[in-house]
Amino acid sequence: MSLIALGVTGGIGAYKAVEIARRLQKQGHDVVAVMTDAAQRFVTPLTFEAITRRQVVTDLWTPGTNADIEHIALASQIDLLLVAPCTANTLGKFAHGLADDFLSSLYLATTAPVVLAPAMNTNMFAHPAVAANLQALQARGVRIVEPGSGYLACGWIGKGRLAEPEDVVAFVQQVLAPAPSALRGRTVLVTAGPTYENIDPVRYIGNRSSGRMGFALAAEAARRGARVTLVAGPTTVAPPAGADVVRVRSASDMHAAVMARAAEHDVVIMAAAVADYTLDQAPQKIAKSEGPLVLTLSRTRDILADVGALPSRADGRPVLVGFAAETHDVVAHAREKLARKRADLIVANDVARADAGFEVETNAVTLVSADTAEEVGLQSKEGVAARILDRVEPLLSKWPAPAPAR
């Protein structure tokens, strides 16, 4: 089957890595263990050697290994790198490109899929630095097995325990052999982020969208085998791997980019927070005065409505998904928008919530179609993206699947 490098780092969950190795072997995979110095304080290399029947890699400087530059040789041989448990320290190394041991060097050298199963104290997992590192890694295409919640070795109760071995192995199996998806071979266009409407060469009107929800949708569509075009407004978040990124700034820029491409796609998902109003940019910086400043705003083109009015939409192509960011009467506004914009699905979210919507890692939405309103509870934006695409896939059934590539 596959050759999997199992990275084991220094956490109490290291004992579970032995069971993970055994279960991977039961699935027919070949496993080579790579242990950090700290991991060897919890489990001995001899244990993994007995389980995997392979020499365990413990040191970048083992005599003789440099003859083949072993971390480079292994990096080109493996089909997947799994790190379980993955400590906060290792997450930080990977996120910032540090390579001071065999495992971190292997991560930088391999082009194989990477799966990380974090495990740490609850407060460590919730720390902004760890969250930023996870976000950076996910943006590069690294898959994360969410840690479990419960009683931790430190005596605390909360999120941070290593996922159970059967869940880690099932996740790896999905990465190596993803389930058939109606999106495989399809073309998907996703918009993400804000738009900026220039007031003068210095100032602009914008909004608080980070682009994370749209980026999560693009990443999930690519994972399911779609060819993804991502039209992104100004963001500080790194776009996901596997998408053709088109950068725009203003609402008119985004309108032009989407309308030039929409009819060629099977699915269009409008997750961007596009400005409803714009203005004519002043040629020079507007000088400050004692009185009020009056700006005259004009309506921007409605991208979602214009895609909904494409001639091909009479036959349901592209499948059209819009977003409705509301602060009250969320579902009612979404239903009205669904009909008015001639969309197939509206993703409605209450952006008045502090834990959902703009500038946070989580979201809670309601998926509104002509006959249903499905609530999706608070979870990661990656999880919400998966639920949205689960609803999109059946809508593709009327269109023949693309022929497999030869």
Image: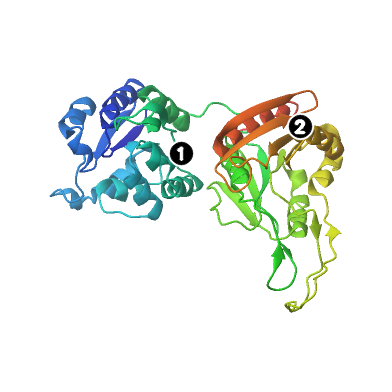
Q: Report the disc number at residue 143.
A: 1
Question: Residue at horizontal 25%, vertical 50%?
Answer: 101
Q: Position of residue 160 (x, y in %)?
A: 39, 34
Question: Residue at horizontal 81%, vertical 57%?
Answer: 277
Say which of 292 and 232 sits in front.
Answer: 292
Amino acid on which the number 2 mark rests in the picture: Val
- Residue farthest to the top? 26
Dot 1 falls on a residue whose secondary structure is strand
Q: Position of residue 8 (x, y in %)?
A: 28, 37
Q: CA distance from mark 2 to mark 1?
A: 32 Å
- Residue farthest to the left? 63
- Residue farthest to the front? 290
Q: Earlier in the sequence, mark 2 or mark 1?
A: 1
Amino acid on which the number 1 mark rests in the picture: Arg
Dot 2 falls on a residue whose secondary structure is helix
The residue to which callout 2 is attached is 331
Look at the image and tell me whether residue 246 can be seen. Answer: yes
